[in-house]
Image: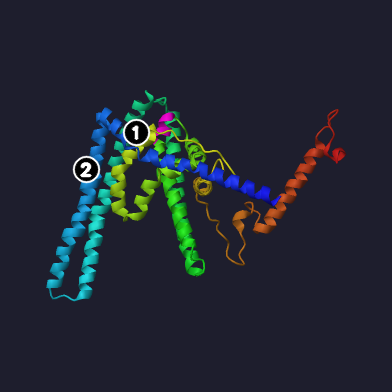
Amino acid sequence: QSRTTMDGAAQTWQHTVDQLVVVREGLEAATYARRLLTFLWDSERIRVRSFQCFVLNFLLFLGSIAVMDLAIMPIIRMLLRASSITSAVQVHVEQVLGALYQLLWVFPAYFISFLVSCSWYTEIADRAYVLRFGKRKEAPPDIAGFVQRMGDEAWRFLLTYSFLLQTHVLLWLSFTVHHTHAYLWFVPFVGLAVHLAHLSWYWSFFCFEYKWALHGWTVDQRVAALEEQWLFHLGFGAPLALLSASLPTFTGYAVIAFLFPLFVVLATVSEPRIHEPSRLLPRRLPLFHQAKLFSLWIVTCINRRAKGGPRLARRRPAPGAADSSRAPPGTGLTGVSAGTEVVAGARSTAGADMSTTPRRRGVPSSTSAR
């Protein structure tokens, strides 16, 4: 029996290793330079927009950061050291100049380049889709469809950034556990591996989303496709995940913003393969489960906030004073006694009405019904 168990475990392990080739297929699809060059050669629009992404993000944005860090800031430090001010003041001046540079140039340039690049990504994806599948599926031009698309975009934005928050929370928890329990030295390495895997799925989702959107898929269908093809997307998004995790924030953005349209083209022409499930490799991995719960919680809070509205505060009477505003006019009763008298009067009136009402045949009175 033990030998049979060992043989079954060995077969399961061998099947798992064989299925990991799907990860390699995803990595090969993301680095298939020959297919990419074919699309660049066949489409002038893809070539032009890709070159514009290179100029905007790599030369202008990243070039300005390099000029500031490698030329301007060293000159400023040299001038400050040549002056008669103290070293503490020099440090504060450098920090203020760096903050002003990021506030007045880096952040505005980042947002402007991001918006412009997104419009170019859409054009590149449309052209690659037409070259690969023919005519794209057009949405009907009606108000209901427009409202639905806006709702899908809002849900997609909330879901994807909740997933990104999930990746960073997992990394933070791994290092927090390591600091509180030093003997768990391996936890940060596991957390870093999980973080890189989530970043791979995150970037692969964005690369394939243009293709799925042109197919006419909803956000839930796109998420289902990623969760069923999770091994392939783990390999496809690995290059962008390594770049975003290893480079500084704005440098990594500039490099990825230049390379991202090329990955969009490769995602459009790729055909992800679903692996054969096993005990160690489930068919569908619920990657967005926690992100969905968090997004639904946010939507519920917003709906409650929108439906509730401000409540009118009741005016309480002063201690020991009669609340004559709640008594019927002309009675001179307090709030409690007035309410008692009103309820008693209503009951007596209702009883008199029922006693004077003629009984109909087949309809029992209230007394006989009781």
Q: Position of residue 123 (x, y in %)?
A: 31, 33
Q: Position of residue 286 (x, y in %)?
A: 54, 45
Farthest residue, direction front: 3
Farthest residue, direction top: 135
Q: How many marks?
A: 2
Answer with left or right where residue 355 lies relative to residue 237: right
Residue 281 visible in rendering: no
Q: Position of residue 157 (x, y in %)?
A: 42, 43
Residue type at mark 2: give it.
Val
Answer with left or right where residue 116 lies relative to residue 276: left
Q: Is residue 213 magenta?
A: yes
Q: Nearer the viewer, residue 32 or 64?
A: 32
**From which residue to which does the magenta span run?**
210-215
Q: Is residue 23 above or below residue 338?
A: above
Residue density around tag 2, few if under 14, some if 14–19, many if 20 or more, within 10 Å: some
Label whose residue precedes the other's in the sequence (1 or 2): 2
Image quadrant where one finds the C terminus: top right
Residue 83 visible in rendering: yes
Q: Nearer the viewer, residue 76 or 266?
A: 266
Q: Which residue in the structure is indicated by mark 2?
A: 55
Majority secondary structure of magenta residues? helix
Residue type at mark 1: give it.
Ala
Q: Is residue 57 magenta?
A: no
Q: At numbered mark 1, what does the secondary structure look like: helix, strand or loop?
A: helix
Q: At numbered mark 2, what does the secondary structure look like: helix, strand or loop?
A: helix
Q: Is residue 303 above or below residue 246?
A: above
Q: Which residue in the structure is indicated by mark 1?
A: 125
Going 39% across and 38% down the picture, which residue do you hit?
Answer: 29
Going 27% across and 28% down the picture, which residue do you hit?
Answer: 42
Please give the label number shown on residue 301: none
Find the distance from the CA under tag 1 to the CA under tag 2. Answer: 19 Å
Q: Is residue 313 above or below residue 223?
A: below
